[in-house]
Amino acid sequence: MTDFNRRENLLHIQERIAKTAERSGRNYDEITLLAVSKYFPVEVIDEVYGFGMRYFGESRAQEIRDKAPVLPKDISWHFIGPLQTNKIKYVVPNADLIHAVDSLKLAQAIDNYAKRNKIKPKILIEINTSAEEAKHGFGVEEAIEKTLEISEMGNLDVQGVMTMAPHTDDKNKIRQSFSSLKNIQEQLQNHKAGLFKILSMGMSGDFEIAIEEGSTLVRVGTGIFGLRRRQ
Ligand SMILES: *Cc1c(COP(=O)(O)O)cnc(C)c1O
């Protein structure tokens, strides 16, 4: 994969999503492709926008703050990185969806911000399905309780759950991590039917497994943009 064939990269990823959806008896339309543009300059994002992409993901508060205002208004920005409470003001006004709410403290702080500004931000709750220490998110055993607690806060629109698969070549472990998130979503929906529709899981290296396990939103960076200078 080269950096210079982003149109082909994008088409190729879309094709693989379509094939995997078909193979899994799922509808292509129910899977959103988020182009993860972190560390790429606005010129490169604009290039991929030109190929029809409208969903872009950023993982640093300053980047979304600086990029969103200078790019086309019909882009839907998602914030996928860890968020510090003092950076909420950079992120919430720019992001249509915040993927990685990983503590009660962060949820409370976004809820307070939302209340003051009379808005209801859309968020996902991050679950640590791999139990890797380096990963953020609520543990699987507390996921239901905490997600329900956050969804009661009043000024947050909890749209679903998100996870990152373990860093391993073991496909079974990756699959287990995704099916564990799907299971959590189903339990949440038993509590509140019709809610928690978004299942954000799958990246460049594992989005096909994620789709097979029910992902509705895959976050693909390298597969579209090429290699980043930083991770
Ligand atoms: C960087 C990042 C991605 C994209 O990773 P790739 O392997 O480049 O596709 C997806 N999700 C999150 C949370 C990320 O930080």
Image (cartoon, helix red, strand yellow):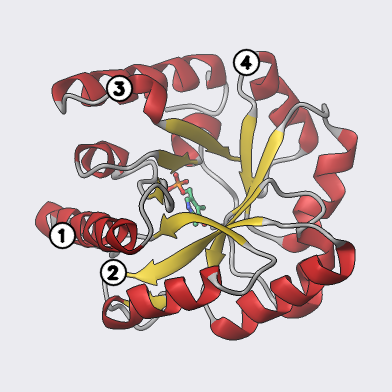
According to the picture, the residue beneath numbered tag 1 turns out to be 176
User: Residue at the spot x=72%, y=57% of the render?
Assistant: 120
Left or right: where 212 falls relative to 102: left
What amino acid is found at the position of numbered circle 3 in the picture?
Asn
> Callout 3: helix, strand or loop?
loop
What secondary structure is marked by label 1? helix
Separation of residues labelled 4 and 3 (CA atoms): 20 Å
* Residue indicated by mark 2: 129
**Upstream in the sequence, badge 2 or badge 1?**
2
Crowding at dot 2, Cα within 10 Å, few <14 / some 14-19 / many 20+, comes out as many
- The kind of residue tagged 2 is Thr
Q: Amino acid at mark 4?
A: Gly
> Mark 4 = which residue?
52
Residue nearer the viewer, 18 or 190: 190
Residue 27 is labelled as 3
- Residue 173: quarter of image: bottom left
Q: Earlier in the sequence, mark 1 or mark 3?
A: 3
Q: Quadrant of the C terminus?
A: bottom right
Residue 166: image location, x then y, percent = 28, 65
Note whether 6 is above or below 149 in the view shown: above
Marks 2 and 1, how far apart at CA: 8 Å
